[in-house]
Image (cartoon, rainbow, N blue to C red):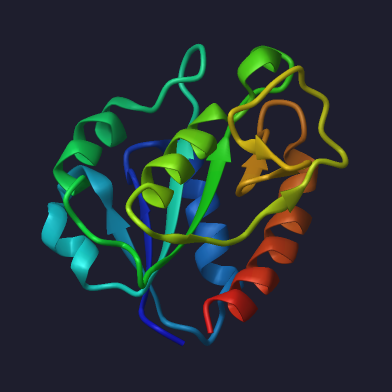
Amino acid sequence: MGKIGLFYSFNSKKTAKIAGIIHNAFSGIDVQLVNVDEVNKDHFLEFDNFIFGVPTWFDGELPNYWDELLPALEEIDFSHKKVAVFGLGDQKGYPENFCDAIGIMVLFFEERGATITGNYPLEGYTFEGSKAVRDGQFLGLPLDQENQARLTSGRIERWVEVLKKEFN
């Protein structure tokens, strides 16, 4: 298995909590935690496999720290890299753009040649629309800590098992 980096903002409390659970679910596998508030493009050259944590802000936007970082990554070739994205959203408060940030991130890395992994089924979610959905499935792992926190652990376990296989 190639080197895995788990990138998220250490200052985003809910995302950081989820990242810790994901990290623990990879027990026995080296996954390096990386604070996106302190990285530059060279950090992205160190890894073969990426897990990106991104909450959806407001009406379907990336958080400022991701929005400011992505332009620095535009020239990197990710064609031999695998990318998985988890995101936090609110199905009831923002049903028309639930976890849009997952879709925004996936599109960015797809355009740079990355192989996207870790799709997740739509079952169990109730929302109106999402940039994170394609071909009847989510492009990553959507989590709703506001309305479905009790389902988070099981969803993470299922998702990480898929990533363990796909990152090989």
User: In which image quadrant can residue 164 be found?
Assistant: bottom right
User: In which image quadrant can residue 160 be found?
Assistant: bottom right
User: Which residue is located at x 29 percent, y 59 percent?
Assistant: 34
Using the image, determine if residue 116 lies above or below residue 92: below
* Residue 62 vs residue 33, the one in the foreground: 62
User: Which residue is located at x 39 percent, y 36 percent?
Assistant: 12
Q: Where is residue 20 in the image (x, y as percent from the top left)?
A: 49, 58
Q: Where is residue 98 in the image (x, y as percent from the top left)?
A: 64, 24
Using the image, determine if residue 80 lies above or below residue 119: below
Q: Where is residue 14 in the image (x, y as percent from the top left)?
A: 50, 38
Q: In this view, does 160 lie to the left or right of 9?
A: right
User: In which image quadrant can residue 92 be found?
Assistant: top right
Report the number of numbered marks: 0
User: Which residue is located at x 67 percent, y 36 percent?
Assistant: 133
Q: In this view, does 84 lie to the left or right of 72?
A: right
* Residue 14 vs residue 164, the one in the foreground: 164
* Residue 137 vs residue 39, the one in the foreground: 137
Q: Which residue lies furthest to the right in this view?
A: 123
Q: Is residue 1 left or right of residue 160?
A: left
Q: In this view, does 72 lie to the left or right of 20?
A: left
User: Which residue is located at x 16 percent, y 51 percent?
Assistant: 75
Using the image, determine if residue 112 lies above or below residue 15: below
Q: Position of residue 96 (x, y in %)?
A: 67, 14
